[in-house]
Image (spheres, grey):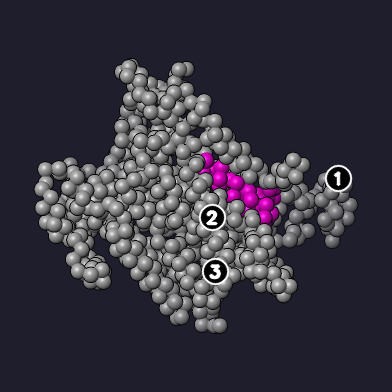
Amino acid sequence: MPFLVRRLAFYLVAAWVALTANFFIPRAMPGNAVQSIMDKFPNLQPSAYAALEAMLGVGHPGSLWHQYTSYLYDVAHFNFGTDVTNYPASVSTLLGATIPWTLTLVGTATVIAFLLGTGLGIMAGWRHGGWLDRSLPGLMFLQAIPYFFFALVLLDIFGVKLHWFPLAQGYNSEIYVQGWNWGFIGSAIQHSLLPAVTIVLTSVAGWMLQMRNVMITTIGEDYVVAAQAKGLTSRRVIFTYAARNALLPQLQGFGLALGFVVSGALVMEIVFSYPGIGLLLLNAVTSNDYPLMQAIFLCITFAVLIANMIVDLVIVLADPRVRARGTGR
Amino acid sequence: MRILGNIWRELPLKAKVGVVLFGLFILAAIIGPEVAPYAPGYSNPSISLSLQPPSSQYLLGTTQSGQDVLSQLLVGIRLTLELALLVGVIATALSVIVGVTSAFLGGVWDEILSLLTNVFLVIPALPLLILLLGYLPNRGQLPTIIVLAGLGWQWGARVIRAQTLTIRNRDFIAASRETGEKTWRIIFFEIMPNEVSLIAASFVNTVLYAIAASVALAFIGLADLNSWSLGTMLYWAQSAQALELGAWWWFLPPGIAVALIGTALVLLNTGFDELGSPRLRASRGSARVAGKKVWATDPTPVLAMLVGSPGRVTGFLHSFSRSSLLDNTPAGGELR
């Protein structure tokens, strides 16, 4: 599959760019983790500087090339050094504890929003000018609200005022123990409902608008008119003829918009004090925890790259034109 | 003026609403700080003025330290819009440069620039922004603008490259090349005028991105916290737990302002889209043909299905209606 090979090569380049940027940013920027600790604890002797560097693994021994290769080696072994604020926990332990929360919540909510938005977009595009289509400007307002602000408002109404949902945390840690037991799972689901609803409501309009626009252009194509002229049922014309072809740009858009959705969801987690990677990132930012910030950046970037690769795979499976384009020429 | 009037009349309703709404905010940004009743940072020493709900003296209430929310909002709108518009200008200029160069030079340059664009497209911007701003000791307006613009050009560059590729193969470009026009002249006077609408659209999108990103960054504290922008207002409201204190007048106004600016920009863009391709317009979707609701996307009406068998009187009356011109039903309503 030449298409897939080309895409794979592209993602490798993208991953390399992210890794290299992550390597050079700390060296090009004035801030620095060790200095921030020194500033925080003024009673530390200047001689502690080298010791701190060694402890955090941020010292720069050897040539730039040597640093670079040992950095790549460390990343390949998920060794991101020791954490500054949660010493002596290693950064990878912290990541391991938070990633499952984010992946479950943001992943599920994003897929639901995408499916729902695409379905609504198909309907709005088909019944062009119908009630669903006319409600779009209202949905655009929802989409324009910053995620975290919408989360604040929902939390105020349903958490503070109505007491329907818990205010913070990923589960009730006073009653339940984390693990595979029903009490914990139920509590976790209860805590994740409001954040999930926030993600779905704020991102659904974007998918819907995009799908609607592609649907409208697809419906004008000759093959759709031909299908109608043959007297096929509306459902068949909508789903097998129009929607299936309109789905390709939608899928490509899904890959590109994923970065936005994930970024928005990260900030949203902060509002709900959800124990995911977004909250970890906030803590890293407020405490100038540079190694943690860098590791989180790499993690999110790689997650988005992998998701994009999966989308590409789906596109190849769903669309014979892409396969043909790959082999021809 | 007449030209402007004509353009205004051509605009779809959505775009008109967007223009008016955005105009209001621009107005607020220009005169806001002058008409603000108090200095945004002035904290009233009197304890009784802390966390006051809206009143005639403080139209939007006060913060915990007795600052006037309305004054903060008016100053904040200017700072946020100033940042977003500057990011929009710089990033759009970058995307035009990259997009046009890439398409026009072709070959290796195109490969390299496209690869660069695609890599920037696929790497999530916000975490990288956080990383960059996190390392900056000075997170004032200018560094934020530079970082946001540096990571905001790729969407525009992609569409502009695609458009330039189709334009540069047209005959009039070949003609101007044959007549010996210089490359820069072809780019600026032959190609660019044909891309004005695309450049405008990508400008609006970039401004939208800049507002969303800058507000989110300020909300997590990555901004100059001594300045008043919509994002820092939200930051202070959140860190003082305005939500738990029930001070809705503190955190609702900046958020709603951001949402309204965003809505105005989205409306503007979809309005422009519809101007370009009228098919997207959500005008009267269904029409009544021969007394039955017909959607634009339905198969061409089959007469028997539509007319059914109307009674004699309805059929007779129908023959006078305009829609009867569409069918060949005899005046009596007899079919076949």
User: Which disc, if any, is residue B317?
Assistant: 1
Q: Is residue A296 left or right of residue B329?
A: left
Q: Which residue is nearer to you in this view: A120 or B35? A: B35
Q: Dividing the image into 4 quarters, which one contains the C terminus of chain B?
A: bottom right
Q: How far apart are marks 2 and 3 (CA)?
A: 15 Å
* Kind of residue at badge 2: Thr
- The reply to whether callout 2 and callout 3 are in contact (CB within 8 Å) is no
**Residue B108 part of the magenta-drawn span:** no
N-terminal-most mark, 2 or 3:
2
Q: Which residue in the structure is indicated by mark 3?
A: B102
Quadrant position of residue A314: bottom left
Q: Which residue is nearer to you in this view: B15 or A184? A: B15
N-terminal-most mark, 1 or 3:
3
User: Which disc, if any, is residue B111?
Assistant: none
Image point (31%, 33%), residue name: B241
Eye-nearest disc, 2 or 1? 2
Q: Residues within 10 Å of mark 3 (few under 14, many from 20)?
A: many
Secondary structure mostly taken by the magenta-highlighted segment of the chain? helix
Q: Distance between the residues labelled 2 and 1?
A: 59 Å
Image point (44%, 56%), residue name: B150
Eye-nearest disc, 1 or 3? 3
**Residue A189 drawn at (x, y percent):** 30, 48
Q: Which residue in the structure is indicated by mark 2?
A: B92
**Residue B226 drawn at (x, y percent):** 35, 35
- Label 1: chain letter: B
**How many marks can you see?**
3
